[in-house]
């Protein structure tokens, strides 16, 4: 008899030593600063060194200063701003030196295509990847900075038309992690159809939708922990039984059967490797 359940996706690469922290955007920077406080708690240092990369934004000075001010409210830290604005800057030896010594590397929001087109394959991004794999380094990103973390990246598509084939724009992200797709401002901008569209195109990808002022910490490359005030929605298409996406024309509506949906909130988690939900009592 044919079994409905397939084997979980196998991840054979060595587990990275670093942490990924993906944030859905609009994290609080004025009052409780819960997300940023959690980020700082991951670092074993009395004065963590933070480098904020403002490549994605069109307002690098203003955006960078917002994070300098926000982190300064949570105690002693050293916050630098890396405005890497072009491909030449992405090879800058001074920038590389600062990346090598940072405890937290934080990608601000904006346009994820600016991130990938300027930083993709550059010495700066390759050093960040190396540090994530080999060292206890925190790689964080908000909004576009989170969406660009995965290998497959959503960079556009109107939510109202996202149920139509071809309406969601997909490219290659920075690639800190494979087999997931991250969407941000997820609940607030109604991006459910957008993320299910991408999962349907390749069910090997786990879709993770992050609400605002909400995020996830990814440990060991596969253990997801929700943080913040809102909702994380997870779409698992590995056991998808049917979809019409290969047979319909562009702009026709997509149908699919047996897409699994999970929601997690602060204190809950999910294992990307085994595709298992993690309840609060089971989180370490």
Image (cartoon, helix red, strand yellow):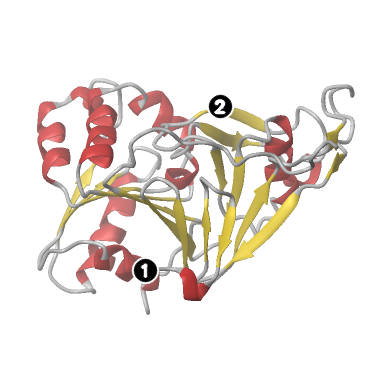
The mark tally for this picture is 2
- From the image, which quarter does the N terminus lie in? top right
Residue 103: x %, y % from top left: 18, 52
The residue identified by callout 1 is 29
For the point 73% across and 52% down, the residue is 260
Residue 121: x %, y % from top left: 33, 21
Q: Is residue 147 left or right of residue 75?
A: right
The residue identified by callout 2 is 171
Q: Is residue 158 above or below residue 218?
A: above
Q: Secondary structure at mark 1?
A: loop
> Contact (CB < 8 A) between labels 1 and 2?
no
Between label 1 and label 2, give the one nearer the viewer.
Answer: 2
Q: CA distance from mark 1 to mark 2?
A: 30 Å
Most foreground residue, 146 or 224: 224
> Does residue 229 appear anywhere in the picture?
no
- From the image, which quarter does the C terminus lie in? bottom left
């Amino acid at each position: 008899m044919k079994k409905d359940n397939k084997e979980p996706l196998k991840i054979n690469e060595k587990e990275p030593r670093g942490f990924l922290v993906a944030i859905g955007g609009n994290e609080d920077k004025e009052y409780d600063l819960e997300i940023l406080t959690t980020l700082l708690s991951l670092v074993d240092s009395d004065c963590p060194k933070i480098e904020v990369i403002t490549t994605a934004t069109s307002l690098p000075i203003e955006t960078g200063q917002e994070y300098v001010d926000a982190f300064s409210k949570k105690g002693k830290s050293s916050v630098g701003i890396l405005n890497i604005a072009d491909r030449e800057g992405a090879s800058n030896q001074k920038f590389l030196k600062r990346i090598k010594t940072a405890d937290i590397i934080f990608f601000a929001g904006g346009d994820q295509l600016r991130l990938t087109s300027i930083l993709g394959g550059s010495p700066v991004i390759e050093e960040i990847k190396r540090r994530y794999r080999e060292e206890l380094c925190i790689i964080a990103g908000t909004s576009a900075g989170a969406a660009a973390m995965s290998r497959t990246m959503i960079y556009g598509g109107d939510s109202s038309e996202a149920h139509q084939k071809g309406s969601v724009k997909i490219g290659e992200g920075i690639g800190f992690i494979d087999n997931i797709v991250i969407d941000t401002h997820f609940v607030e901008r109604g991006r459910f159809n957008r993320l299910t569209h991408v999962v349907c195109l390749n069910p090997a990808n786990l879709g993770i939708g992050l609400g605002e002022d909400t995020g996830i910490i990814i440990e060991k490359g596969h253990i997801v922990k929700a943080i913040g005030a809102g909702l994380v929605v997870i779409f698992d298409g590995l056991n998808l039984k049917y979809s019409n996406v290969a047979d319909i024309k562009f702009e026709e509506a997509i149908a699919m059967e047996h897409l699994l949906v999970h929601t997690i909130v602060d204190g809950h988690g999910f294992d990307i490797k085994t595709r298992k939900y993690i309840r609060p009592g089971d989180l370490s």
